[in-house]
Image (tube, grey):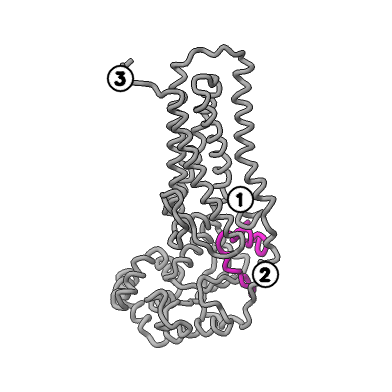
Amino acid sequence: MDERFKPPTSRGYAAVAVVAALLGLLFATYSTLDYAAHLDRRLHDMHCSFIPGASPSGDAEACRAAMYSPYSALLKDEYWGGIPISLFALGAFAFYLGFAVYLLVAGRAAPRSAVRFFGIVSFAPLTVSVMMFVISVSRLGQLCKTCVGIYFASILLAVAGGFALASLRHRPASSVSAGAELLVPLAGLVVLGASTLVPAVVYAGSLPDHRPFLTRCGELKVEAPKVGELVPLRGVRPVRQAMFFEDPLCPTCKAFHERLELEGVLDRLDAKLVLFPLDSECNWMLSEPLHPGACLVSKAVLCGGDQAKTVLGWAYEEQERLTAAGKAGPNALKELLRVRFGDALIRCVDDRKTDVRLNQHLHFASENKIPVSTPQMYLGKQRICDEDTDIGLRYTLTQLAPEVLR
């Protein structure tokens, strides 16, 4: 054995574990508090920082996208928003913190079975973190900073667990009976399970009943325009009619469509799209543009004809480039559209008839007193509340249109 190698001391790995558990507990607490804050059905700033204790921020799109995704919580069918997975992490890290403090205080007096148990179970958070990391990268395409904080804490905890297992080689054989040796890991598993589950059970028991609020956001007052004026977004297996009011350059609309796709809902809707660009170039309901260039991109969607759904999908995929081009001016935006869809689409965009058609979409929105914000979703004539299109989406659909989730 290399004399320069010094195995971790009994208190060394425990100290590392205490730090790891504290970090995990802190980031899991922030994530859970952010989730719980939205139970009042309002929009809130979020803790989205690598720095523990940083103030909540309104600029937290990656964290918000993660929170709104289907992977942020369990039992979303049963509870509005579901049970956030960060709550399970909070309970687990609280257990690891308590156990690590015990090992730190006990030092070499801690039984081998306790050290072995801690070393083995300390890899559990890392396993879950790897799974969530893969989902974030492959399905969401981005990482939230509080999630990364939990990933880092999980790695650090696993390192401490590895040191704990390595330290067993330098401990004397245990003098306790085999039965007593077995009791420690069994009792530890029970306490770990309880610590992980109890917060979730308490959370579920304290959730308010959101069902009375689901149908309080109004209905369409004016019938939809005749066939051909709105943009069809018919799914492959439609079982329910729906209507969307969207802006192709609206980041929230993009995120909303991604959630519907992840849930498999779009395939089961016979949807119509009303283009509602938040751009004062064509939208007289605004005094200044929120999304410059949205009028032009909306006309491109209208000009897509049978391929309108493809144009809309491309606009969402290339939203950052289109937004930058929109700020640079119409020529830059048209060039991107020309390169992708050809000169024929640009001629259609410049046609006066397309202006009239987009104006009809805006008049339809105005006649129905649609809020000047996007996205808006209607099931039949029933408007889905804004807050029910984000973390409450699956619960709302379970209550109002369960057939689209089957």
Nearer the observer, disc 2 or disc 1?
1
Residue beneath label 1, please? 83
Which quarter of the rendered picture does the C terminus lie within? bottom right
- The magenta segment: 379-406
The answer to which of marks 3 and 1 sits earlier in the sequence is: 3
Quarter of image, res 270: bottom right
For the point 45% across and 43% down, which residue is it? 151
Residue 392 among magenta residues? yes
Q: Residues within 10 Å of mark 3 (few under 14, many from 20)?
A: few
Residue 40 visible in image: yes
Q: Position of residue 283 (x, y in %)?
A: 45, 82
Residue 387, x across and y down, in percent: 58, 65
Which of these two is toward me, 10 or 374? 10
Q: Of residues 206 and 15, which is closer to you in this image?
A: 15
* In this view, the mark in front (3 or 1): 3
Left or right of 114 on screen, residue 219: right
- The kind of residue on which mark 1 rests is Ile
Name the amino acid, label 2.
Answer: Thr
Against 29, residue 250 (above or below) is below
Q: Give how far apart the Cα atoms at labels 2 and 3 are.
A: 70 Å
Q: Which disc, if any, is residue 396?
A: none
Q: Residue beneath label 3, please?
A: 4
Give coordinates of residue 206: x percent, y percent.
Answer: 68, 53
Q: For the residue labelled by badge 1, is the local secondary structure a helix, a strand or a loop?
A: strand
Residue 265 as seen in the image, left or right of residue 145: right
| Residue under the point 46% across and 73% down | 247
Are there few (<14), some (14-19), or many (20+) residues within 10 Å of tag 2?
some
Provide residue 103's location: percent of width, then percent of height. 52, 27
Identify the residue position indicated by label 2 in the image: 215
Taking the magenta stretch, the answer to whether it contains residue 292 is: no
Residue 311, quarter of the rendered image: bottom left
Nearer-N-terminus badge (2/1): 1
